[in-house]
Image (cartoon, rainbow, N blue to C red):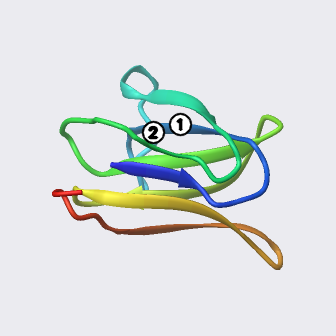
Amino acid sequence: MQVSNSTGQNTQYRVGAGGGSVPLVARSSRTGSLGAGEKITVKLGSPYPWLVEFSINGAVVASGTVKKPPAKVALAECPVGYTVSVSPADETK
């Protein structure tokens, strides 16, 4: 899964099993930092769905759920804060 930060701020991310009404499972989660404009690839296995949370200064600002791989998850700024887009990814790239 490709995870990107399209904002002008450094962020932290957490990816783990969960999503929707399913809570994030801490033992299966991956965490890290993303600089402004940075993108990374996070390799995860089953089960799905996966919840992706983005934090700034320790506070979760937005999250999105990946229901089917492969996917691109992007954090972006919007007029009232932040938003996350989840879209299919091309596995060949």
Q: Quadrant of residue 78?
A: bottom right
- In the depicted structure, whether residue 28 falls above or below residue 37: above
In the foreground, 67 or 79: 79
Q: Position of residue 83 (x, y in %)?
A: 64, 68
Q: Position of residue 28 (x, y in %)?
A: 36, 25
- In the depicted structure, whether residue 69 falls above or below residue 27: below
Q: Amino acid at mark 1?
A: Arg
In the foreground, 19 or 57: 57
Residue 80 is left or right of residue 62, and the answer is right
Q: Residue drawn 20% across and 35% down? A: 45
Q: Position of residue 34 (x, y in %)?
A: 62, 39
Reading the image, the residue beneath label 2 is: 15
Q: Quadrant of residue 93?
A: bottom left
Q: Assess whether mark 2 and mark 1 are in contact (beta carbons under 8 angstroms).
A: yes
Q: Residue drawn 42% across and 29% down? A: 29
- Density class for disc 2 (Cα within 10 Å; few <14, some 14-19, many ≥20) is many
Q: Circle 1 sits in a helix, a strand or a loop, which is it?
A: strand
Q: Position of residue 79 (x, y in %)?
A: 82, 79
Residue 60 is left or right of residue 28, and the answer is right
Q: Which mark is residue 50?
A: none
Reading the image, the residue beneath label 1 is: 14
Q: Amino acid at mark 2?
A: Val
Q: Residue drawn 78% across and 56% down? A: 8
Residue 45 is left or right of residue 50, and the answer is left
